[in-house]
Amino acid sequence: MCGIIGYIGKKDIAPILFQGLKRLEYRGYDSAGIATLASGFHIKKDVGKVDEIHQRLNFLDAPGTLGIAHTRWATHGGVTKENAHPHVDCEENIAVVHNGIIENYQELKRNLISLGHKFKSQTDTEVIPHLIEEMMKKGKNFTDATASALKSLEGSYAVLILNKNERKLFAARKGSPLVLGISDSGYFAASDIPAFLEYTKNVVYLHDYDLAVLTDNGIKVFNLMENREVERKVDTVNWDIRQAEKGEFDHFMLKEISEQVDTIQRASQQNKELINHVVEEMKNAHGIFLVGAGSSYHACVAASYIMSKVSKLHVNVVLASEFPYYEHYLTDKTLVIAVSQSGETADVLEAVKSAKAKKSKVISLVNVVGSSLTRTSDVFLNINAGPEICVLSTKTYTSQLALFILLSYALVNKYEEGKKKLTRLWNEIYHLTSATTRTKIKELAEKLRDKEHIFLIGRGLQYATAMEAALKIKEVSYIHAEAFAGGELKHGTIALIEDGTPCIVFVSEENEKEILSNAIEIKSRGGYIIGVSPKNNEIFDFWIKVPESNNENPIVQIIPIQILAYQLAVLRGLDPDHPRNLAKSVTVK
Ligand code: M6R
């Protein structure tokens, strides 16, 4: 939703906040701002992307060694300078940046206004500095006032708070991600580790209701529910700063697509005991739900086909946002497998909450260790794809698939066979992400760049791929793309086919005849057929060669379309890393 970063220590604050904002920009990019403390506050904020605002306001000349910053994805209040963070109280003594949603802000705001407070924005966030100000007016010190203010908030928050008169940084969370970084030269707090990864790999994951006080001498964490100081363990992450940088690539999206050659291998290096434990849970469960949103949901759809075929195991696949309507089925014998790259998607966390309320077991597949999902699940498996910065899921989607493939084979005592199948994909993925493939796909993108609609069809596993491929094209190129099960076309959708309508057809050996006959139905109505297939066919107007990989088809077949979506965005003059209206983790329901 939004990204926040703060620092206290010996280093100059300006480059830390500026770099941090750029690394967090994937979380929201309609406005940004910073507040640093050096003989009073220095606040700069405006609408636009971080670099654009920097051109106008020069973030790099902000003084001091203590400060906070925010990059925004608007929820409450339009995209205006006044609504950009940081927000301050009436006397401008308290500055706050916030990620999340304060659900009771209207009531709090009304009350504060009746007490004489003057608001400058339409945001929910602005109630926080005013609440702290009000508590301090009543005689509380900064720490107690902050604790009381936070206790009165309903909804979700990750906040960083500064007081003009104290050299301290407060960091608190409930329902939104916040992680601390510990280095020799100072302390960090941010929505995500890449924001400070170049300074330290030592991190502390805060829990809900934690209020951390960061000073030059260290960190103390209090839990507002437990009303006491708590110990939080220091973890070391194995992420590398190069994973969070574009390197020689123009965009993170292309870099992350190319990384799949390694990420599939990493996803398949799992702890065998843990996999066996998950397998036992799956075998013993009375009813299994696979739950996710967006691409993670598509990985669940693909998994349901693989599990049916390889493991003969029935699973129910449900969109996270629809899951509450199935809660009547849940018992203490049900197993919910929650899938989420970020581990912070509100719909997924809500689904887990309802499962927990019925005492069902929750196992999750995540990429961000320490995220809310890893902490609320009974067990989690790390897909281990490294930081994914582009808003679109690419490498994390295929890593989720890899893990599901591994589980499907492990369910029938063929863990090693599953692992071998994934290992063998290295060559294929290397070729599919090579410059040769990219050049070929660019030719296709040139043909499709001005189209208004693209249809995609597949059967079985390839239907799941068609759904994910349509999402990739839509979200980054803004071309309307829609996926259908091949057999469904004749039940209505075929009416949409006109002369030249592009249709991407995903072919596998398993259902080659059936899907090609659907493609012929489209071709005979003037459709332009793009085959994603191991073999060429006379009905294809354009052929993308992919190896026949059976149960691994969803991995190899999506890669060329990820590249196509990327090329379409670039040709249409769009920024693939920051599609309009989207945010990397959707932490609102
Ligand atoms: O972090 P999650 O996997 O839970 O995110 C779920 C969706 O928000 C995400 O897959 C989204 O659809 C992406 N934009 C897909 O590219």
Image (cartoon, helix red, strand yellow):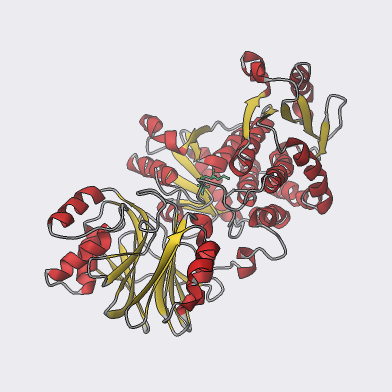
Position of residue 443 relative to residue 12, above or below, is above
- In this rendering, the answer to whether 525 lies above or below 584 is above
Q: Give coordinates of residue 171: x percent, y percent.
A: 35, 68
Q: 352 or 192: nearer the eye? A: 192
Could you tell whether 116 is left or right of 80 in the image? left
Question: Residue 144's image quarter?
Answer: bottom left
The answer to whether residue 393 is visible is yes
Q: In which quarter of the image is residue 328?
A: top left
Please indicate, yes or no, whether residue 226 appears anywhere in the rendered image. Answer: no
Give above or below for 67 relative to 584: below
Residue at the image position 67 percent from the left and 17 percent from the top: 494
Query: How many circles with numbers are drawn on the protein?
Result: 0
- Residue 222: x percent and y percent? 28, 69
Q: Which of 35 and 176 is in front in this view?
A: 35
**Viewed as shown, does residue 60 lie left or right of 34?**
right
> Along the line of sight, which residue is nearer the eye, 159 or 397?
159
Residue 45 rendering spot, x and y as whole percentages: 42, 64
Left or right: residue 37 compared with residue 400: left
Q: Which of 150 and 22 is in front in this view?
A: 22
Q: Quadrant of the C terminus?
A: top left
User: Which residue is found at the position 55% from the left and 43% from the top?
Assistant: 296
Whole-percent x, y for residue 538 in the image: 88, 25
- Outermost residue on the front side: it is 56
Please tell me which residue is depicted at 48% across the width and 51% down the height of the picture.
585
